[in-house]
Every structure is written in structure tokens, then in C-alpha cells.
Image (tube, rainbow, N blue to C red):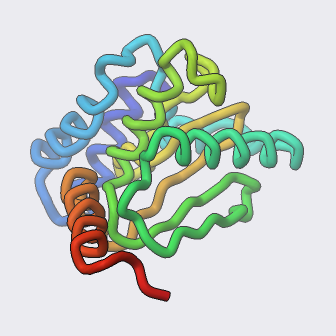
Amino acid sequence: MTHDQAFKTAARERAASRGINYTAARREILDQLAEVAEFGHLPVIWESARVRVPFVRPPRERHQLALGAIELAIRESGALEGAMHRDRWRTLDSHIDLDWDGGPYAHEVLRELIAFAEAPDTGTVDPGQLRPGVSLLGDLNAVWISGVRVRFRPYKPIGAETARAQTLAGIRARTTTGGITA
């Protein structure tokens, strides 16, 4: 399946699932893809194209390697700043789901992580090692590393800027009221 076919399939699925027209669904997908446009050298992995190939479960070692690399990159990049109640799951198909409450949208986290990884001196993830992934409904919500999909699943996201502003406001409130209490 070509990039064009995968894009059209995702737009049709998104339109049908959300009760919107094809053009609106297409526009929503393009808006999210614009987040990673500066990294055009990285191929986008479309879930609609992936489901048409034989299923290959990544080995446990690659799963552990991917989880460690992503967790370290998230911490060092600050991509989930303002997110609460983080959790991670190994999915039935041996991939990884990362959940959180509040905080940034999935495509914002993805963009932060790819920008972090593409910097030549991070030491955590090598340039070109992370690949953006698009769900069946056209959401830019995953990265692929070493053949393992790491899907980001925010619950009630508020956006990266709002989350950072709330975090800073909370820190200021604690420092002006005499510090943190136990």
C-alpha cells in the first residue's frame, strides 16, 4: 500500500468514525502531519498499511530496549511535562501503550520526541531511530523504534502549552506560599 493509499484509507475511516466529511477528515490528518513536516526524511508508518502485512511479534528484548529508550527520551526531553497519572502497558501484539491524564496531545509528544531524537548529541536515541506512526483513524499518535510501536494515549489532554503554564503556576504558588508541605 502506498503512502497515498494509506492516507486515503485513514481519511475515510476517520470520516466514518467521527461523522464528518472526507475533506474535514483529510484536513485534520494533514494538520497533525504538519507537526513532523520538518522531519520529512523519516518515513511515516501507516497502521492501515501495516495491517495488510503478516503479523510479526517483536521479541521481548526489543520491547524492553524500546521501552527504556522512550522512557529516557521522555524524561530528558520533558515531552510529558504537566501530564499526570502516567502508565504503560505491553499490548497483546507485544507493542507498548503509554497513557497519561491531562498534559499534551499525542501528536505534540511525538513531535517533541522526534525533535529530541534528531538532535545529534542527545545520546539517548540516535537520529533516524524514531519513526512517526499514524493510526487507522489517521491520528499521529505513535513512534516506532527497533520494530516496536509505542502508542501515546492521552486522557483529557489540554495541550503542551497549557500544561506547561499550569505546571509553572503551581510551582510559583508553592514558592510564594512558603514552600511545599508534606
Residue 145, percent across and down?
A: 65, 34
Residue drawn 65% across the image and 55% down it: 96
Residue 162, percent across and down?
A: 19, 59
Q: Is residue 24 left or right of residue 98?
A: left
Residue 42, percent across and down?
A: 47, 18
Residue drawn 21% across the image and 51% down it: 161
Against 48, residue 162 (above or below) is below
Q: Quadrant of residue 84?
A: bottom left
Specify whether residue 57 is in view: no
Q: Is residue 159 left or right of residue 155?
A: left
Q: Is residue 166 left or right of residue 98?
A: left
Q: Is residue 137 left or right of residue 49?
A: left
**In this orientation, which residue lies closer to the viewer: 87 or 153?**
87
Against 25, residue 156 (above or below) is below
Residue drawn 19% across the image and 48% down it: 25
Q: Find the residue positioned furthest to the bottom.
A: 182
Specify whether residue 163 is in view: yes
Against 179, residue 147 (above or below) is above
Residue drawn 40% across the image and 65% down it: 83
Q: Quadrant of residue 147?
A: top right
**In this orientation, which residue lies closer to the viewer: 48 or 74?**
74
**In this orientation, which residue lies closer to the viewer: 1 or 99?**
99
Q: Quadrant of residue 76?
A: top right
Residue 45, percent across and down?
A: 51, 32
